Image: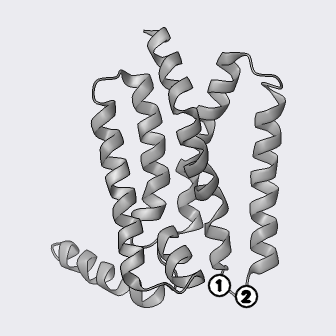
Amino acid sequence: LPSWPSDFLAQLKDYTSYTELGSVSWIITTYYLRLPRGVEWVVTGSFVVWAAWEWYRSRRFGFRAMLWTTGLSLVLTHFIAPRTATTHFAPLMLPMFLWFSLRSQTGAGGRNRVPAIVMTIVFVGTWWLFLATVQGRQESAITYLPIPLVLAALLPLIRKPWLRLSQEAV
């Protein structure tokens, strides 16, 4: 269709008219905390700077180290993008699998049990949270928070061990 670029831009412009919730940053700062819009911009800008810094830092590392930066980028996208949705959570399995991989490579206890338990909690927990908070056909803003927040807290904790293992693998 010759008109697809303009049709796409029109749909993009209309998107915000039928979506109620913004990014994770917006949900926390504006929706729940009712802070001024400028606070959301500062928080979002901080996440952009963090992502850019990690991209810059990772340029000298190999592919395995870049996986961590990619995982962080996937997580931070939920904090930065103007809109997010729980349907966008599928790529967040990558950062979760980085942690599982790190556990298995370092010989941490419960190497096989922990991923199974965590994935069960994620599956059952997210559905429970959705069903407990859904209002009509609209999912609650709270459903957007647990997975990105946990991963945003977890990834900085596993960065050094992941990079150390990545260097050893070379």
Residue 84 in sight: no
Vertical relation: 68 (above or below) 140? above
Q: Nearer the viewer, residue 126 or 55?
A: 55
Where residue 125 sits: x, y (%)? 79, 59
The residue located at (76%, 54%) in the rendering is: 123
The image quarter containing residue 94 is top right
The residue located at (37%, 50%) in the rendering is: 50
Tag 2: Cα neighbours inside 10 Å, few (<14), some, or many (≥20)?
few
Vertical relation: 123 (above or below) 154? below
The image quarter containing residue 154 is top right
Name the image quarter holding the N terminus: bottom left
The residue located at (67%, 86%) in the rendering is: 137
Q: Considering the numbered disc 1 on the image, is that residue within a helix, a strand or a loop? A: loop
Query: Which residue is the site of mark 2?
Result: 135
The residue located at (47%, 34%) in the rendering is: 68
Name the image quarter holding the C terminus: top left
Q: Nearer the viewer, residue 160 or 122?
A: 160
Q: Left or right: where does residue 7 sit relative to residue 16?
A: left
Which amino acid type corresponds to the residue marked 2 in the rendered image?
A: Gln
Residue 51 in sight: yes
Q: Left or right: where does residue 20 sit relative to residue 93?
A: left
Where residue 47 sits: x, y (%)? 40, 57
Query: Which residue is the site of mark 1?
Result: 138
Q: Considering the numbered disc 2 on the image, is that residue within a helix, a strand or a loop? A: loop
Where residue 161 sits: x, y (%)? 56, 24
> Is there CB contact under 8 Å for labels 2 and 1?
yes
Task: State the separation of the CA atoms marked 2 and 1.
Answer: 5 Å
Which amino acid type corresponds to the residue marked 1 in the rendered image?
A: Gln
Vertical relation: 12 (above or below) 97? below
